[in-house]
Image (tube, rainbow, N blue to C red):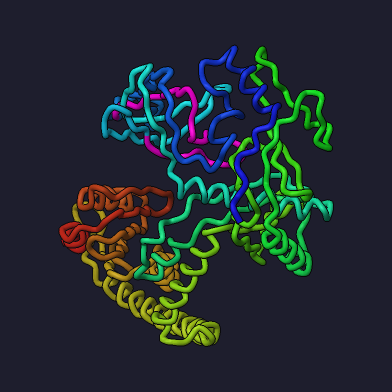
Amino acid sequence: MTPPGPIISSATSSALETFKSKYSSAVVGLLACQIDSYLKTLTTKVISCTEIPKDTTKKASKGKKETIPENPAKYEIELADTTLFPEGGGQPSDTGVIKLKDSEKEIPVFAVKRNGLTALHETPEFIASGTDVEVHVNWARRFDHMQQHTGQHLLSAILDKRNVPTLSWSMGKTIVPDAIVPTTVSEAVTALPNFNYIEIGRKLSQQEIDQVQAEINDAINDCLDIEVKIPDSNQSLATPESEAIIDPNTDKGVIRHVTIGSLDNNPCCGTHLRSTAHVSALTLFNHTQSIRGTNCRIFFLAGNRVVQYARAANDYLRKVNSTLSCTTEDIELKLSELSTQLKAAKSAEKYWSLEMAAKDAHDLKSKISTFAEVPENGYNGVVVYNAKGSMDYFRAVEKELGPLEQIKSPSPFVIVFAGGQATESGLIIVAGTSKEAIDDAAKKVKEAVPDVKGGGKGKWQGKVVSWKTNGIRAIENLFQ
């Protein structure tokens, strides 16, 4: 079936002429990309080109301003008309290139935004006013956006029949190119396309989700025509809000209506497919998300994203199969077995960690009891360094030691606990029998490990972002 061409009604033609009297370029709502969303290339003219002001300052952490490196210049270009859609209606902006007609030069368009009813194209280069150019849309990105956006209209229309209105929607980020072949589980997860969602006022039952899915499939298979219409001010499209605003003395523009056969009729500024057949497929996912009381988010993918999701999910499963050394059917059983083994391993680790903590505490008490009489600095000290030592482990040692003041010692003392390996993060704890001894020992710790950050009352605790070998050695020799 040959898809129908763009719907240009007499009202559309009238609106085009009306706005030409006020605006030097086509207005948002009547852009070439909105009149014919399948238009990939357009010959047009530069109306204006303005450099985007640069922000050369940023707020420092304490409210002071500091100079930051200057970013490359960027420009906002107004064209007589464009085939690049400016962000709006939940649909991201198009990207593409502007080709200078008299040369082979191509200038990328990073984004298109709206300033009132004017579309502005963000580029890295200046183009003089009056220059003849060709605008080329990134078609893969545009078609993906149309599949998701039209898919959302179709889903919302089916739900409207059940008196479940759509409160809001969000389009997931543009898909990862198929050329990226994941080689690890994490890469396979990254390759999964981002879900779209609609927010509705209540949760759907599994039966309702299945029924909605079936009706969506039918609508796609029925190849329903999708049209964009602009009604005259005296014309009605079945809704009170449908009267168009075609007034060159206002900045409201026109109201465009997207109709899906006799199924749906809704105002929308976005670009849409010509037929539900071009949606190709739409998949609702069984998992939902409760939000704002009784509201619920339903997640879905449409078009090529469904294919990509199937491929990426299959790649993900294959990587999981390889990692777990099992078939897909046995993944759940394998994970259950691993979970049981992990719990047993953690239980054993906790047991032996407590045993080690008890032994270390016993050894510490023995060492403390043999301290010499009060040295010149007023206290003795001992270091307990454990490369694998965690906060839980050192707390277990402290618990086994009990109140330090009750440990027999010929002098006041401090204990410095240190954990972590070279190049990795770690921790340092300073505990003792007097505040003066703890403060003095903490000062020595900071001299030995300059980048440690910490503090506290009763005892001193610090975090080491990244241990250095000489820092570990300095801590171990702190009291020698």
Residue 264 or residue 73, whichever sits in front: 264
| Snapshot quadrant of residue 204 | bottom right
Q: Quadrant of residue 352?
A: bottom left
Query: Residue at coordinates 69% horizontally, 41% vertically from top-left?
Result: 258
- Between 292 and 216, which is closer to the camera in this rendering? 216
- Residue lying furthest front: 2
**Lateral position of residue 190 relative to residue 31, left or right:** left
**The C terminus, quarter of image:** bottom left
Magenta segment includes 262: no
**Residue 70: x %, y % from top left:** 28, 27
Q: Which residues are magenta?
A: 72-97
Q: How many marks?
A: 0
Residue 78 colored in magenta in the image: yes
Of residues 225 and 265, which is closer to you in this image?
Answer: 225
Identify the main secondary structure in magenta: loop
Kindly identify the residue that appears in the image at 75 percent across and 51 percent down. 157
In this picture, is 204 found above or below 143?
A: below
Q: Nearer the viewer, residue 118 or 422?
A: 118
Image quadrant in which you'd find residue 371: bottom left
Residue located 29% across and 25% down the image? 67
Image quadrant holding the N terminus, namely bottom right
Q: Position of residue 444 (x, y in %)?
A: 23, 50
Could you tell me residue 201's position as x and y percent? 77, 50
